[in-house]
Amino acid sequence: MHVAKQAQIPAGEVLRCDDPRWRRVYDIICEKSFQTGDFILSSRVRSKFLFQLRQTTMLAEGATLIAEIVLEYMKRHDIHCIGGLVQGAVPIGQSVLMLGSAEQYPIHHFFVRKEPKNHGACELIDGYPMDDSEVLIVDDVATKGGSINTAIENLLKEHPSCVVKRALVIVDRQEGAAEALLAKRNVQLVSLFKKSDFPIPT
């Protein structure tokens, strides 16, 4: 663990950019996940660039590094529960869950659906939210903040005593998510990377 660096990280940051893990994850994203072209995002916005981040979060090296970074963030804030909306949150949360177990830092993990299943037990949430405790909401990328807001809203429908103060994403596209979540939910959005870190086409 990078204990010396942890002490120097400001509260609103996930990892210092001079940490070698920051650079390595950045390189993986550039190689595997960052695309340019003409795309329609889940927010229905048209974009000249795309972060296909599951190509990073489901790659062994990417998953391992991201799990280390997110787990360190959770330890700094004494958080033991992680979850978010399918599909982006699932590989992140699962990797953190496994690493937490290996390091004897117990983690509860869950994922949230947009709508309840229409068969079986008709679950809206799978896994183990922690009632009366702080929950870290995660996603791979944030644009307008809609997916994170849906995750929080549906979580609190079934677990109203959960406390959500923070959401963490791998990449913030800097298109209003941080401002919207703070205004609507009083939730601070933090990210490992921002759009401005990448060579975005004009």
Image: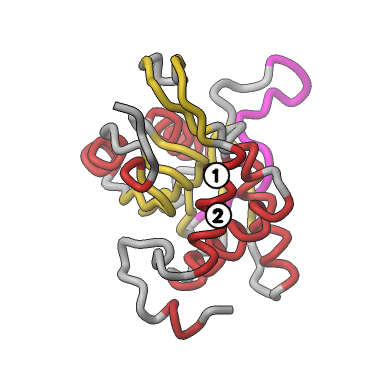
Q: Amino acid at mark 2?
A: Val
Residue at left 36%, top 16%?
45
The image quarter containing residue 46 is top left
Residue 135, which numbered label?
none
x and y percentages locating residue 63 in the rendered image: 66, 52
Between 172 and 84, the one lying in front of the other is 172
User: Which residue is tagged 2?
Assistant: 25
Residue at left 42%, top 26%?
49
Magenta span has 62? no
The span shown in magenta is 118-131
Badge 1, how many Cα within 10 Å: few under 14, some, many 20+?
A: many
**Which quadrant does the N terminus fall into?**
bottom right
Are the residues at dot 1 and dot 2 in contact (C-beta closer than 8 Å)? yes
Residue at left 28%, top 32%?
175
User: Which residue is tagged 1?
Assistant: 29
**Which quadrant does the C terminus fall into?**
top left
Count of marks placed on residues: 2
Q: Amino acid at mark 1?
A: Ile
x and y percentages locating residue 76 in the rendered image: 45, 72
Q: Secondary structure at mark 2?
A: helix
Magenta span has 127? yes
x and y percentages locating residue 66 in the rendered image: 58, 56
Q: Secondary structure at mark 1?
A: helix
Between 67 and 137, the one lying in front of the other is 67
x and y percentages locating residue 154 in the rendered image: 49, 32
Residue 23 higher or lower than 153, as above or below: below
The image quarter containing residue 117 is top right
| Secondary structure character of the magenta stretch overall | loop
Between 122 and 182, the one lying in front of the other is 182
Residue 156 higher or lower than 98, as above or below: above
